[in-house]
Structures are given as structure tokens and as C-alpha cells.
Image (cartoon, rainbow, N blue to C red):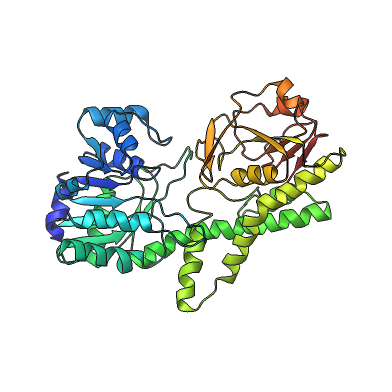
Amino acid sequence: MKEKLLKKIRSKEIKVGVVGLGYVGLPLAVEKAKAGFKTIGFDVQEEKVKLVNEGHNYIGDVVDSDLKKLVEAGMLTATADFSFVKNVDFIAICVPTPLDKHQQPDISYVKSSVEAISGYLSKETIVVLESTTYPGTTEELVKPILEKGSGLKCGEDFYLGFSPERVDPGNLIYKTKNTPKVVGGIGKDATEVIAAMYRAVLEGDVAEVSSPAVAEMEKILENTYRNINIGLVNELAILCDRMGISIWEVIDAAKTKPYGFQAFYPGPGLGGHCIPLDPYYLSWKAREYGFHTSMIESSMMINDKMPEYCIDRAARILNRFEKSLKGSKVLVVGVAYKQDIDDYRESPALEVIELLKNSGAEVSYYDPWIAQFKYHGSITKGMTEITPEQVEAFDLLMITAAHSNVDYEMLQKHAKAIFDTKNVMKKIADRGNIEVL
């Protein structure tokens, strides 16, 4: 089976299936198709299927013209009908892995996708899970479902492995095409074949590890590393505020050291599809072994409390103007979870807005990338533009995303008070009405 699949990879005879056409799946499907592999995208959302089949792009990291050309050439199609799984040789599962309301891993999307695949799985098929999850998912959850539903034997009739997604929306240097990959299959043959498939498509290095569990833990380490270090600077930011020291100046000074230090920055909390979530997956799994990830859990607690801390700081700023938070008009600038993207998944700005409202403030928001957002089932629309007259009407501006296409000089000139949680206004000389986190 191994040699046959390797030959099909070299000759581009492999037909690819990508399950989940979101921020991870659609860019991957496009790259597979661009590399010469006929690709089918699977998604339960009919609207996404329709958009792909019409050649209409909805993901920032995908080039519009690339998608359109691939669809017109018949290299990429989309469907909600999982029976087409029987026509593919390689399946990448790229579905969401959020947390439930109890902050426990929600792997229902993975489970339902694997169940849908299992009934149509053919012999000599390669299955790869890319969704971030806890160590053990591929072998303990995915493998039994595939074997039971298909009647096939993993390692003998099909190959299975894990290769964690590494998607950084808005990154101008690293995209799906040139970002290194990690691959861990169940058995050496599976790892070799899966790695060969990625090498046939991507420019980045492909690192092979001994098992899916190693690859799953590696992904958790990547994002937990960032979570912990951001938690450290967030805690120091709170301390520096009490001590009258600028944490931003401290970090700038520390990063002059050419070794042994990497700069991380404070903010109103963590956002995105990985960093705020992945540590919870690990701490949840660790309890199965009677182990508590104390350092990780501490950083999570600090980061989770940052929106509340920002509200406290906002209230203190307003107090200097003899105004309470209740009844004050507050403009939140930026609801995306990072700069210059239209993605607000897990954005701390959404909680900041909710906390402001709960405190009795009149809250509006402006984000040139996001016209509206949905949070806790409710849709909130933003301001379509922001003028000097509008800025002057607010008691406080809170900067919660460092977008580059916002006129911060105009904001500073006309705002009564500004709380800049991202230090995006650091180059503005007149700082009498600016306070930074």
C-alpha cells in the first residue's frame, strides 16, 4: 500500500478531500489544487459550499483569483454530500475544536466529521486530522470510529495520522504554502506517506515525529508557550501600573538583549482560534493522569481576567474627569482579535464591550475590518465611519486592536480621553489624553 500511494503522489493521481472549509481548510484545499491534485472540499454549511463553487472567496489568506481559476479549471469543487468521500484518496479534517460553556474541549465537530467519513472510507485512503486537539484524539477517538464505520483496519487498509494546522491569519510572510509542517502517523509507513503528500504541496519543511500523540502535544506546546509568556507580561503590566512604570518601555529595553529573551506584549486578553483555547485542552487531558498543569492554569487565569482589569482601568480614567462608567459614552476601536484582519473569534474586545454595557456605559464600536459581530447570539453593528465630531461626543475611547488603517492622530486630537490597550499610539507626541495599558 505504501509504495502504491507514494507512486500516486508523485504522479499527482491522488484525489484530495478537505473537510471543513474555514480558515484552515479552504487555504489548504486551494494549495492542494494549485499543486495539481484534484480537490473536493466538504462542509456542512451550504453557504460556504455555494461560495466556493461560484469561485467567491471569503477567507483573507486565500487569493481571490487563485480560487476562481481553480474552480473554473475543475481542480477544486465543494459539496455537503459526504458520499463523495469514496472518490478521494487523501482526506484532511480541518474542523473547529472550540470549548463548551464549561471550558471543556468540544470535539463534537471532529467526531461528527469522522463518523460522516467512516461510512464511505475506501481501502488505501490516507486520513489526516489537522484540527487542534488534546493528545490522544487521533488514536483514541478517530481511529476506532473509522475502523468501526468502515470495517477497515488502520495500518493495513488505510493510513491515519495527525498534522497540526499552523494558520496565522493576516501574516504577511508565512501562509499555508510556506509554513513548516509536523506529521505523526500511526506507524512509520503512515508517517512517510502523509509527509510525502505534504511535501508534494507545500514549500515549508515537513518534520516527521514518532506518533500522532507527539504531533498533538507539539501543537499544544506551541500555543501554550505563547499563552504563558503573554500571561507573564500581562501580570507584569498590572504590577508596573501600580509601581508607576511603563511595561512597554521595560519590554523595549529587555529586547535589546540579543539572546535569551523574546518579546511578548500585554493586551486586553487573548483572542483567536488557538492560543486562548489550547491550554484548556491540555489541562483537561492532564487531569485524566492525576496531574494539574499549575503554571499553565495560572497564566490562563491571568489572561482571562484582563478584560475585567481593562474595565477597572477605564473606570479610573473616567473618575479623573469626575464621571462614572455608568452613563458614560465609550467608543471601542477594534474588535478583531489581532491587527488588520476581519476575524473576531474569541476576541477579548467582545467581552470588554459586554462588561462595559453591564457597567451601564453607552458603548459603540468602530472597526474598519468588521462591520458587525455576533456574540452570545446577539448581533452588534459598528459605526461605518468615524469623524472628529463623533469622536468629541465620547467620554472615553478604548483601543483594543492595533489596526494600521485607523487615523490615530485624528482620534488623539479630538478625544477627551483614550485608553490604549495595544500601545498603537506610541508614536504620537501629544500624549496628554492618552493612557496605555
Question: Which picture quadrant has residue 60?
Answer: top left
Q: Of residues 231 and 99, which is closer to you in this image?
A: 99
Q: How many marks?
A: 0
In the displayed structure, 365 sits above or below 224; it is: above
Q: Is residue 174 left or right of residue 432?
A: left
**x, y percent for residue 251:** 69, 51
Q: Quadrant of the N terminus?
A: bottom left
**x, y percent for residue 89:** 17, 50
**x, y percent for residue 342:** 50, 35
Question: Which picture quadrant has residue 108?
Answer: bottom left
Q: Is residue 60 visible?
A: yes
Q: Is residue 163 visible?
A: no
User: Which residue occupies 69% across, 43% down?
Assistant: 356
Q: Of residues 235 and 386, which is closer to you in this image?
A: 386
Q: Is residue 210 left or right of residue 170?
A: left
In the displayed structure, 161 sits above or below 86; it is: below
User: Which residue occupies 60% across, 68% down?
Assistant: 295
In the displayed structure, 65 sits above or below 160; it is: above
**x, y percent for residue 363:** 68, 36
